Amino acid sequence: MVYEGSSMKLITAIVKPEQADNVKRALSKIGVHGLTMTEVKGYGRQKGHTEFYRGSEYEVAFLPKTKLEVAVSSKNFKKVLDTIQKTAKTGKIGDGKIFVTSLSAVVRIRTGEKGEKAI
């Protein structure tokens, strides 16, 4: 089975939860109508923070984040990447990261479409 895929990318963005809906709306405006959104926890340079609950102090090591995954063709890649970056940016520590992976195959389960047609 031969798959088309070298021209497709998977963009994975880890953003602040409060920015996720803004990113979704901005992507919809530029023609992206499918994405996967997952609630995740993690830490980076932001580290954790200390909170108090019922008089006891405890450390929150993993902070809530939202992971967005979008498969795009190479021709839309730069526009989608720029849109996510501009929309998710608050200028404060913890804004997140964007990872880009080349996709070797995409198959739409329902129709069997492959490659960019399946995105």
Image: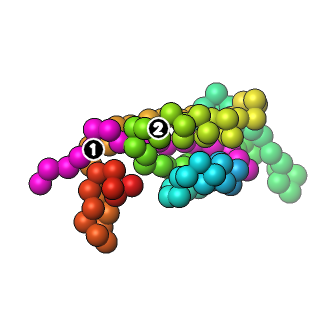
Quick one: 48 or 56, which is closer to the camera? 48
Image x and y of residue 89, in percent: 70, 35
Residue furthest out toward the left: 1
| Vertical comparison of 16 with 38: above or below | above
- Marks 2 and 1 sit apart, C-alpha to C-alpha, by 14 Å
Q: Earlier in the sequence, mark 2 or mark 1?
A: 1
- How packed is label 1: few (under 14 Cα within 10 Å), some, or many (20 or more)? some
Left or right of residue 68: residue 116: left
Residue type beneath disc 2: Phe
| Vertical comparison of 28 with 46: above or below | below
Please give the residue where the numbered disc 1 appears in the rendered image.
5
- Point 43% across, 48% down: residue: 71
- Point 63% across, 43% down: residue: 15
The answer to which quarter of the image holds residue 5 is top left
**Magenta-drawn segment:** 1-20
Check if residue 78 falls in the magenta segment. no
Image x and y of residue 24, in percent: 63, 53
Quick one: 52 or 113, which is closer to the camera? 113
Residue type beneath disc 1: Gly
Please give the residue where the numbered disc 2 appears in the rendered image.
77
Image x and y of residue 103, in percent: 32, 43
